[in-house]
Image (cartoon, helix red, strand yellow):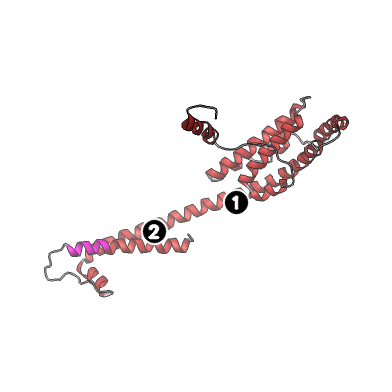
Amino acid sequence: MKLWKQTCLIAAIILAAIFLILAGADAGMNPVGSQRCVFEIPGWFGCLLANHEGLAGGLFGGGGALFSAWVAWRAVMGQITAKEDATYEAIKIELDRVADVVVMIWRVVDAVLLPRRREDRETWRENGRAVLLAIYPGSGSLIEKLDNDLAKDLDPIRRKEFTRVVESLKWLCDMIEKRDEERLWFENLRTMLTHFNNYVHQFDPRVNKKFKDRTKGNVDHRSYAAHLEPTVSQFEATGNLQP
């Protein structure tokens, strides 16, 4: 809801509450020189104010203070939101640069894993490993671009999403820096790249578009409960773990 609509709604609620209290007081009063107000708009409002001047003054004073407190709270929240949004935009600029490097790495991985003649595969893997190590800038260069100190000013949801982006980038860097001779090294790199892609998509779908043409691995980011659901459902239906 837009701010001006919220402001009007809060003001209307406070006024409605004031006149409801005045109406309750008027309905329960024992008239001495005055009569209970007849519900006829708009005269009813003036009658309530006239019959209960002291109470009305206190209620309007309290209502005004409440409204002022709400306006001050909204101003503070607006400043916090503006800071969070500015931080988010700053981090996206750095993430965009990191994503450009990751795309280069992913392109090499995709090229190596294209279907090829058996006699060519080892050559592509050996040369691909050399190219990756040549273009890889190092974990410090990549990860330090994503300023975790700056991330503390993000809202809680974005901060959690950003933490996952950084963690997945560390997984990728760790895998590259192993530099081992594992036969499935490139396949594992694709898996790490896919994790990074999925977490970037949650944090910033715009940057994630850089990876749209890359080949993804099979990863599953469902919650732990979602992973358990088929097993529990199978047991409920059959009493067994197997169909």
Residue designated by label 1? 86
Q: Is residue 37 left or right of residue 42?
A: left
Q: CA distance from mark 1 to mark 2?
A: 27 Å
| Residue 212 in the image, given as x and y percentages of width and height | 71, 47
The structure residue drawn at horizontal position 75% and vertical position 34%, both measured from the top left corner, is 138
Q: Which mark is residue 68?
A: 2
The stretch in magenta equals 20-27
Instruction: Point out the frontmost of discs 1 and 2.
Output: 1
Q: Considering depth in this image, is 6 or 176 the residue closer to the camera? A: 176
Dividing the picture into quadrants, the one containing residue 39 is bottom left
Q: Determine if the magenta segment contains residue 26.
A: yes
Q: Position of residue 115 (x, y in %)?
A: 81, 37
On screen, 84 above or below 137?
below
Tell me: 230 left or right of 19: right
Q: First in sequence: mark 1 or mark 2?
A: 2
Which amino acid type is marked by label 1? Answer: Ala
